[in-house]
Image: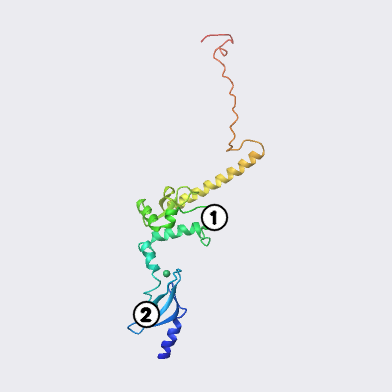
Amino acid sequence: MRSNIRQNRRHLIAGTFGRLTVFKDSSKRTPGGHVIWLCVCSCGNPNIKEVSTKNLTSGSTKSCGCLQKESVTTHGCTGTRIYGIWVNMKARCYSRKSKYYENYGARGIKVCPPWLNNFLTFKSWALRNGYQDNLTIDRINNDGNYEPSNCQWLTKSENSKKARRDRKIERIIKIIKIINVKILKSGGHGLYDNRPPKIKKTPYPPSSIETAPGGGYGLK
Ligand SMILES: [Zn+2]
């Protein structure tokens, strides 16, 4: 029994519980006789945290306190749908690991700083602008950023319909650009050329006098 306890004690060293990693027995004991361990937190806090075996193994202590602080700044929204939308939006724009990065971050799409740095700012904009649990975030201008002036909430089907339309428009613009280059290379005016158009001199309309029946200076 005693050797079992000793093994368990050793077993906790180097063990990870949430953000905490156990590195030493503090030699202190709880009133109930539980070992109090010295732990470091992966958040980077240099202070050592003392946690009992019970609190570590039951999961009641998982960090130096940083997790609770974070949950206050997200008002306990971690895990909610809207929080997921915020996390995924940032990932699309800034995480090369995201499978959507290519269509967002790689294209220069960004999240405006007030939203990027503060979930609650994003959440409060969302709630004031029609967010509902069946809606998805849409950028009105497909080349624009995630920011209040360029975002709205659409149903999933509206959003994908719009995405298809945007892709179609992009294809058409691409084709126009190719045609334009070809026309410009061949010396002509492009379809969207910035040079002022040549003014066509419209022939002066024949006056009614000239066209008067009989060809003379007839009066109508
Ligand atoms: Zn921490």
Amino acid type of the residue tagged 1 in the rendering: Ala
Q: Earlier in the sequence, mark 2 or mark 1?
A: 2
Q: Quadrant of the N terminus?
A: bottom left
Q: Look at 39% across and 68% down and name the residue there.
A: 67
Q: How far is mark 2 from mark 1, CA to CA?
A: 47 Å
User: Can you tell which mark lies on residue 22?
Assistant: none
| Place of residue 43 in the rendered image (x, y in percent of width and height, measured from the top left) | 45, 68
Percent from the top left, x then y, of residue 124?
Answer: 36, 54
The residue that mark 1 highlights is 106
Tell me: residue 20, above or below residue 129.
below
Query: What residue sits right under mark 2 in the picture?
Result: 54
Crowd tier of the residue under label 1, counting other residues whose Cα lies within 10 Å: few below 14, some 14–19, many 20 or above: some
Q: Position of residue 103 (x, y in %)?
A: 52, 55
Quadrant location of ligand 1? bottom left
Residue 156 in view here: no
Q: Looking at the image, which is closer to me, 128 or 56?
A: 56
Task: Give above or below for 191 relative to 170.
Answer: above
Residue 24 in which image quadrant:
bottom left
Q: Judging from the image, what secondary structure is the residue with disc 2 in?
A: helix
What element does badge 1 sit on?
Answer: helix
The picture places residue 187, in percent across and down from the top left corner, at 66, 36
What amino acid is labelled 2 in the image?
Lys
Tell me what residue is drawn at x 35 percent, y 51 percent: 128
Tell me if 64 is positioned left or right of 144 in this view. left
